Image (cartoon, helix red, strand yellow):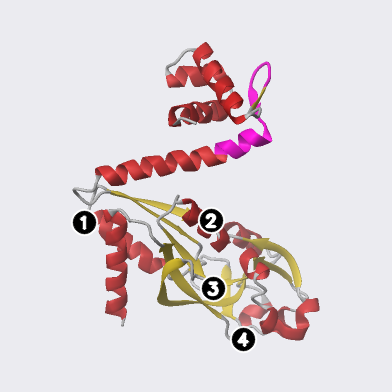
Amino acid sequence: MELRVLRYFLAVAQKRNITKAAQELLISQPTLSKQLADLEDELGVQLFIRGHRQITLTDEGEYLQTQAREIIQLVEQTALNIKGQEVISGTISIGAGESIAMNRIMQILSGIVKDYPDVKVRLISGNADEMETALQHGSIDFAVLMGNRSLNNYHHIQLPEKDQWGLIMRKDDSLANKVEITPEDIAGLPLLMSEQAIEEHRFQSWWGNLDRKMNIIGTYSLLFNAQLMVAQGSAYMISFDNLINNSNNSQLTFRPLSPTLTETTSVIWKKNVTQSKAAQLFMKRLLASLDTYA
């Protein structure tokens, strides 16, 4: 597969129309149609279902679209980084979940883009499994992971910040009068839980034999949409501290769990990979910030 043909394929997949894609690509429609037919022949699968007004992707086409986007992104990022070897430029790509430790990461990135205007930042949000997969595929330089995970396959640094688990609820809820939240307090309540924490059985020891009384009505991977449901008064959410808006105008408040439950945060990157100068600069400044902290 040629990169040029992959770009053609992505254009058609986005436009859902060969004529419009050909106009955007500045090539003739017959030429584009032949390139797509050749690609299908090369792969031995049908990528498109051609309708009267528009085309749709087959399952194989959907898969190729996802992979092609990653391939093009990786090629473009690599080209930028290579071109910028004489000066510090290129893109620093970081994938992360939501954590108080991201304040440190953002401070470092802010300093870098201020000092080196040619450096760009690409931030990807997702859970730990998604970020680890992106790192393995080479589409990000670093992943920031929360929780106790096996990191033997990566270079890694543990950050000093720790995230504390607690209950997020409306400020007018009766539980907001408590200083801490125990397992008995939330037994039977409609709970939204971190998808990753549920998969890792993170709260099994915390709530102990009350497991059967826990009413988990849903899971979330990122906080924003879940807290909208909590604001409606239809659910409670177990999440990290410092992630919601604690201003007087906010409807929500946070109370820590008791016994206390915390998570560590680690920055990881692939072994045996030569990093760009921009990525090396990020790591240098991250290590310097830890020396300052110590």
Q: Nearer the viewer, mark 4 or mark 2?
A: 2
Evaluate if marks 1 and 2 touch, with contact meaning CB atoms under 8 Å apart. Answer: no
Residue 105 image point, x, y percent? 37, 65
Question: Which of the two labelled residues, at mark 1 and mark 2, occupies the earlier sequence position?
Answer: 1
Instruction: Name the spot of residue 117 as percent of width and height, x first.
Output: 23, 49
Q: Label 3 neighbourhood size at 10 Å, few (<14), some (14-19), many (20+)? A: some
Q: Position of residue 125 (x, y in %)?
A: 50, 56
Disc 2 residue type (three-letter): Thr
Q: Are marks 4 and 2 in contact (CB under 8 Å)?
A: no
Q: CA distance from mark 1 to mark 3?
A: 32 Å
Tell me if residue 63 is in the magenta stretch. yes
Does the rendering let one see residue 237? Answer: no
Q: Which residue was labeled with disc 4?
A: 258
199, above or below 16, in the image? below
Indicate which disc residue 115 carries.
1
Question: Which residue is labeled 3 in the image?
Answer: 147
Q: How many marks?
A: 4
Question: Disc 1 versus disc 4: distance between alpha carbons?
Answer: 44 Å
In the image, which disc is placed on residue 133? 2
Residue 187, quarter of the rendered image: bottom right
**Cα distance between the residues tagged 3 and 4:** 18 Å
Identify the image quadrant of the C terminus.
bottom left
Q: Is residue 90 above or below residue 64?
A: below
Residue extent of the magenta highlight: 50-65
Residue type marked 3: Gly
Q: Residue at left 39%, top 40%?
A: 75
